[in-house]
Amino acid sequence: MNSISPPNQPSMPSAGKNGRSPWAWVPSLTFSDSLPSVAVMTISVILYKQMGLSNAAITFYTSWLYLPWVLKPIWSPFIDLVKTKRWWVLAMEMLIGAAFGGIAFTIPTELWLQGTLFFFWVMAFAGASHCVAADGFYMLGLNPHQQAGFMGIRTLFDRLAMIFGQGILVMVAGNLQVVFRNSITFSWSLMFYGVMGLFLALWLWHNYSLPYAKDDIKHVYIDARTVWEGFLETFHTFFTKEHVVFAVLFIVFFRMPEGLLSKVSELFLIDAGHNGGLGLSPQEYGLVQGTVGIIGIACGGILGGWLAGRDGLKRWLWPMVVAFTLPELIYVYLSYSLPSSLFVINLCVFVEQFGYGFGLTAYMLFMIYYSRGEYKTSHYALASAMMFLSMMLPGIVAGALQESMGYRHFFIFTLASCVIMYVLAAFLKIDPHYGKNEE
């Protein structure tokens, strides 16, 4: 990009629209935006497994927690009707912190399942609302040049939140169990109290650091009827696009094998050997899945984005689809070999997560590609809702299927289900030039 400003136009400042540096709030806001989803979708699985819940119950309960992200396009327009984006960000951070505290408080009680599920639901809805408000706030608090320049920083801190949640926090819970003589409830409760304190600190920091963007105002002239009519128009224009049938089928079904695999693979890593699992401790799981695995996803995603930008999405579609089956292949291998070497397990998880990150690039780029047009933001939000639905529905039944089949046959079943990915990819219509540098 040319760094020389056109005549009569000032060069881009380093601070935001109100003169406050984005470095003071963009990294921390991205971190606070990503951590609740990690807690809801991943940490909850490890917690319930250690608390003795069955695999069928774990996948059933935790998969329903995707629902707020599925419904996000429906209620997100109403966030524009009440208060400002800044108000929503701060209010949701306070609510998320309270939800972490509620989970910590209810874990040692007799109603630990009902209590923790309630507060995970609170966290899920608050986290999805925070995501809507934060995405809007980035556009209001940053000028276009800064929005592009800070995209890499947002990606970095999103990955750091995943490492912190899946890796460090799970390790902390495991280490506390050693310190407090294997007291699972007390250790997890203490860990969640710590995260509550972290979120309250983030809330205090953002009270100070978030700018008051000039355009971040309540739109009093918009009523609920106007928003609803706009949603119906978005829905209609999306489903009257060209090649809509195969596009929607691809968005809904491409990630269903992953939806079956994702939660069960986490349970497989920590399940005891006599149950067919690898028997990793929380500390080992934090290293394998929460650190090495996240690095693998990041590397695969970076490579996929670079190749798609160089040669276009269509050129790399099939290699990415093939790579997306690597997780299923790796877990079939792990379920039969049951390696005891932590190095081998780390290597396998890195390879499967690298393939996952590389293959997911094609899926995400296709959603952007198909959402192009007048309503691209709303269409992408609708496609994202379908994506979360495709993860939620198979996850609900995944645990029950695994318990009836066993880990080995379940992983073979998920591998066989990948056939649908190849069938749908064969019918996609993609512009050969889409994604190339010349665009």
Image (cartoon, rainbow, N blue to C red):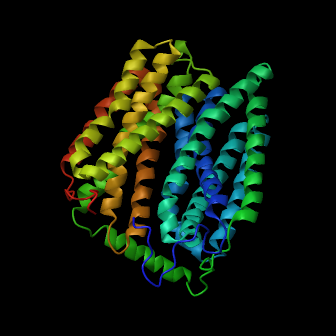
In the image, residue 35 lies at what x, y percent?
Answer: 62, 47
Residue at 40% x, 44% y: name it: 302
Image quadrant for the C terminus? bottom left
Task: State the image quarter where residue 3 is shown.
Answer: bottom left
Residue at 27% x, 70% y: name it: 240
Q: Please determine whether, in this image, residue 397 is positioned above or below residue 307.
A: above
In the image, residue 326 lies at what x, y percent?
Answer: 34, 31
Q: Residue furthest bottom?
A: 221
Q: Please determine whether, in this image, residue 109 is positioned above or below residue 147.
A: above
For the residue pair 154 and 428, the one nearer the viewer reads as 154
Task: State the image quarter where residue 107 is shown.
Answer: top right
In the image, residue 204 lies at what x, y percent?
Answer: 77, 58
Q: Is residue 252 visible?
A: no
Residue at 42% x, 18% y: name it: 335
Q: Please determine whether, in this image, residue 437 is positioned above or below residue 62.
A: below
Image quadrant for the N terminus? bottom left
Q: Please determine whether, in this image, residue 227 is positioned above or below residue 323.
A: below
Q: Is residue 436 visible?
A: yes
In the image, residue 80 lies at what x, y percent?
Answer: 58, 75
Q: How many marks?
A: 0
